[in-house]
Image (cartoon, rainbow, N blue to C red):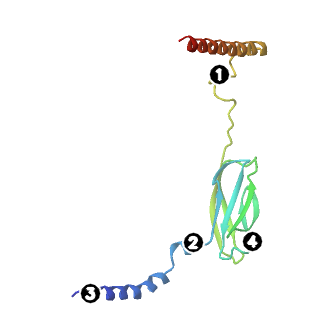
């Protein structure tokens, strides 16, 4: 049995609303909380971005070493910026969002040890080169200019003679 193109299009048009009515996974996860960056040394700043069903009302986010932070509406999300205390021990800390309607979401903030190098790499160059005096640099510059003028004069004379 052969179906015509219009009959196939009609069947597709009837099935399309059924497919569109199913809830997509992206819409199901509309309540979330995240930190940026998710891994941070103690003492650094983090950004918090969250979403509730109604992003026009502020919500609260609780992070154990920091405390409770109010995230406010901004460009369609709930956002805030805060700093991880410098005395925070390394480890994983839960980030809990509580929306005004009672819905919640959770994520994890990873705090790592802050390591600062004692000094830069020993690559040589400027820091280890002997210092030149200003008179030596000026004398070298004048000698280079004089050599350039002398070569210019010699080149000009050769063209006239040649």
- Asked which secondary structure carries label 3, the reply is loop
Image x and y of residue 128, in percent? 68, 19
Q: Determine which quarter of the picture holds residue 134.
A: top right
Q: CA distance from mark 4 to mark 1?
A: 55 Å
Q: Nearer the viewer, residue 143 or 19?
A: 143
How far is mark 4 from mark 3, CA to CA? 56 Å
Label 1 SS: loop
Q: Secondary structure at mark 2?
A: loop
Residue 19 versus residue 76 in the image, above or below: below
Q: Is residue 3 depicted above or below 84 in this figure?
A: below
Q: Whole-Å distance between the Cαs marked 3 and 1?
A: 80 Å
Q: Position of residue 54 (x, y in %)?
A: 68, 76
Nearest to the eye among marks 4 and 1: give it.
1
Q: Position of residue 144 (x, y in %)?
A: 67, 15
**Neighbours of disc 2 within 10 Å: few (<14), some (14-19), many (20+):** few
Q: Which mark is residue 58?
A: 4
Query: Residue 4 vs residue 29: left or right?
Result: left
Q: Which residue lies under the disc numbered 2?
A: 29
Which residue is identified by label 3?
A: 3
Quickly name the residue at label 1: 125
Quadrant holding the N terminus: bottom left
Left or right placement of residue 69 versus residue 11 in this view: right
Q: Residue at x 70, y 57 (%)?
A: 47
Contact? badges 4 and 1 (CB < 8 Å): no
The total number of labels drawn is 4
Mark 1 → mark 2, Cα distance in angstroms: 55 Å
Query: Tag 4 or tag 2, which sits nearer the N-term?
Result: 2
Closer to the chain start, of discs 1 and 2, is 2
In the rendered structure, which disc, 4 or 3, sits on the residue that comes first in sequence?
3
């Amino acid at each position: 049995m052969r179906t015509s193109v219009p009959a196939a299009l009609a069947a597709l048009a009837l099935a399309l609303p059924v497919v569109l009515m199913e809830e997509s996974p992206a819409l199901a996860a509309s309540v979330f909380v995240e930190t940026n960056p998710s891994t941070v040394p103690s003492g650094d700043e983090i950004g918090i971005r969250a979403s509730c069903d109604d992003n026009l009302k502020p919500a609260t986010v609780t992070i154990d070493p920091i405390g409770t932070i109010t995230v406010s509406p901004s460009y369609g999300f709930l956002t805030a910026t805060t700093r991880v205390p410098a005395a925070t021990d390394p480890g994983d800390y839960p980030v809990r969002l509580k929306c005004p309607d009672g819905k919640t979401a959770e994520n994890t903030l990873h705090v790592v040890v802050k390591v600062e190098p004692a000094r830069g790499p020993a690559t040589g160059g400027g820091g280890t080169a002997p210092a030149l005096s200003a008179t030596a640099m000026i004398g070298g510059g004048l000698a280079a200019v004089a050599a350039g003028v002398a070569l210019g004069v010699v080149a000009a004379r050769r063209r006239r003679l040649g």
